[in-house]
Amino acid sequence: MPVLEPLSFECISHSAEQTQRLGVRLAAALPAHAIIALSGPLGAGKTQFARGVGLGWGASQPLRSPTFTLVQEHHRPADHHTLYHIDLYRIERHEDIATLGLDEILDDQTGIAVIEWAERAASLLPEDTIQVRFEIVQENKRRLTFSTQDTATWQILLAFRKNAFGV
């Protein structure tokens, strides 16, 4: 029996800064219309990773937790594309997700979406979503598991892994 699911790999981050740098590296590998689903417990590093994605993608403003606004749009000055930073922490019912316009966001062919607490919308996410699961190992140590169900997206993850870790 394999240790990991197919089309997945994991790594360990030893600090919040390293978690953010992983987000920067992933952003460098992302095509337009990428969807990144972040899941894990409170305080595991999801927002820190999302900040890194925003930084590496070229968002004009640093990403902050959108917990109270649920969706924040960030723009890239170079091409006016949009990064949608979505936080589903406060969503209690599946029906509430419909009020966010998530369908329209996921259909944006030039934007990317970073979704925190994505497990609350798992049934709405397409097969080519990049899943990042965070686990707290120790106070400053996190295990990140990157996965997808799509072989084309797996190639993106492999490019990211090579850029970030050299393997």
Image (tube, rainbow, N blue to C red):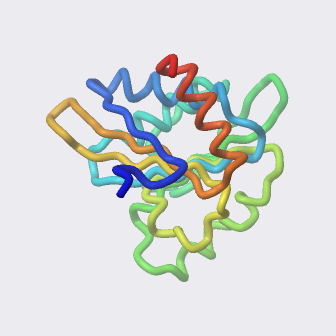
Q: Residue 57, position in %: x, y? A: 65, 28
Q: Residue at x 39, y 29 (%)?
A: 19
Nearest to the observer: residue 44 or residue 147: 147
Nearest to the observer: residue 22 or residue 91: 22
Is 138 left or right of 29, judged from the image as shown?
left
Residue at far top of view: 166
Quadrant placement of the N terminus: bottom left
Residue at far front of view: 1
Query: Which quadrant of the figure has residue 41?
Result: bottom left
The relative height of residue 25 versus residue 71 in the rendered view (above or below) is: above
Residue 60 visible in image:
no
Residue 166 visible in image:
yes
The relative height of residue 98 versus residue 164 in the rendered view (above or below) is: below
Q: Total number of numbered labels? A: 0
The relative height of residue 167 versus residue 125 in the rendered view (above or below) is: above
Q: Residue at x 36, y 21 (%)?
A: 17
The relative height of residue 78 versus residue 10 in the rendered view (above or below) is: above
Query: Which quadrant of the figure has residue 20?
Result: top left
Q: Residue 22, position in %: x, y? A: 47, 27
Q: Residue at x 54, y 82 (%)?
A: 95
Q: Residue 117, position in %: x, y? A: 43, 58
Q: Residue at x 26, y 25 (%)?
A: 14
Query: Which quadrant of the figure has residue 158?
Result: top right
Nearest to the observer: residue 124 or residue 99: 124
Is 162 left or right of 22, judged from the image as shown?
right
Q: Residue 122, position in %: x, y? A: 52, 68
